[in-house]
Amino acid sequence: MPAADTSGPSDFTQGALTAYRSVGLGIWGALLRYVGMPLEKFALFMNSSQVSGSGQMTQALRLVFKDGWLAPFRVVGPASLTAWFFQYSAMGLVFESVDSTLSKALGVKRMVYGPQLMEPPKPDDARPSARDASLSAAKTVAAPIISGSIESMIANRAEVQRYFGMAKFGELNVPSAFNRMFGTAFAANAARNAVMSSTSFVITPLLYKTLYPQEKKDKTSLFWFGLGMNIFFGNVVAINLQALWGRSLDQLAKEGALNYSKVVRDGLRAEGIAAFITPSKWFSRVLMNAPAQGTLPWFYNDMLPQGEWIVYQALGTHPSATSR
């Protein structure tokens, strides 16, 4: 097995770059999530048991604005703003840290980033050894799962709070110490975040680098490719997990307990597969998620690299040629 690529920034410089990217992602994500709060509430209601039958979009809109046009923004407290920042910040920080650590431990290359996406695939990229391929695959699967789980530890409790509203949230009976700390329906939330992390940091850059026509690669195509992957892949999978999360919270509020298998059985019995995915549920999820998450591959790989000179200048170092 060939040795890992060790050229590029020092560990200290790489750490500073990771911190810069994480802060940038946190600001970007928090800003777009706050602006899109009505869309988030709309998606949350659409993927709950509070709307059913015909006219689901109308039902959800009425729930969103039943207390006035500014009602969606009033459920956002300091904890939510902080959670959004750390949610997106941690998304990048944890993924980069896990990717870097596992890559060094396993002797494989790190995930492609920034200008690397615009480079044509190298001949040896398509023909790794069986051992390299298996180690890279294991790392590629593990990184977004760990990242998504830690992201949920930071953000799930605030998401549950926004779903119920602060008053009702305080009335919930949550016996588990873990769920009191990190929010209930954690597993569904973490699985959803792992899917979205994979879409943003793994699947989109890999497919764009290896399959997108080289002559058509530019900033605009990366923006739309990332948005398309989010809308037509990531959210198609995540919408089922989002519905599971919403219905789980509804069960907790009604019965004081949470059982995922019962949530699934009750949903399928009542509405069939439509309990977890319909065109309107997918559309509402896209409205909530695509502005922030769908633009992450573009923002992360195109916009953030343009400001990295500030980090290099502050540290008195110079960027390496191509390696991370």
Image (tube, grey):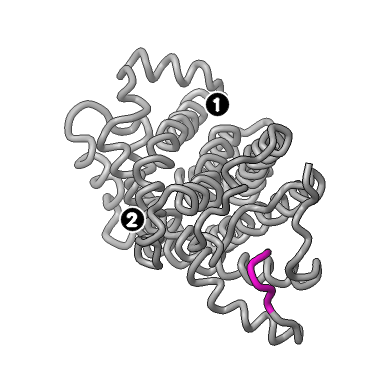
| Mark nearer the N terminus (1 vs 2) | 2
- Judged left or right of residue 182, residue 297 is left
Instruction: For the C terminus, give its image quadrant.
Output: bottom right
Q: Which mark is residue 207?
A: none
Residue annotated with mark 1: 256
Hey, what amino acid is under mark 2?
Pro
Residue in the picture at 82% in, 46% down? 105
Where, by quadrant of the figure, is residue 198 drawn? top right
Closer to the camera in the image, 135 or 166: 135
For residue 51, above or below residue 17: above
Residue in the picture at 49% in, 68% down? 302
Instruction: For the N terminus, give its image quadrant.
Output: top right
Assess disc 2: are there few (<14), some (14-19) or many (≥20) residues with their C-alpha within 10 Å of its C-alpha.
Answer: many
Query: Disc 1 vs disc 2: Cβ atoms closer than 8 Å?
Result: no
Residue in the picture at 53% in, 22% down? 260
Residue in the picture at 68% in, 77% down? 319
**Does the rendering let one see residue 184?**
yes
Q: Is residue 321 magenta?
A: yes
- Judged left or right of residue 129, residue 213 is left
Where, by quadrant of the figure, is residue 163 drawn? top left
Closer to the camera in the image, 297 or 94: 297
Measure how far apart labels 1 and 2 are at the Cα level: 28 Å
Residue annotated with mark 2: 38
Closer to the camera in the image, 286 or 205: 205
The magenta segment is 319-323
Q: Give x and y (percent) for residue 229.
A: 40, 47
Q: Is residue 159 magenta?
A: no
Helix, strand or loop under label 1: loop
Q: Give x and y (percent) for residue 140.
A: 63, 42
Hey, what amino acid is under mark 1?
Gly
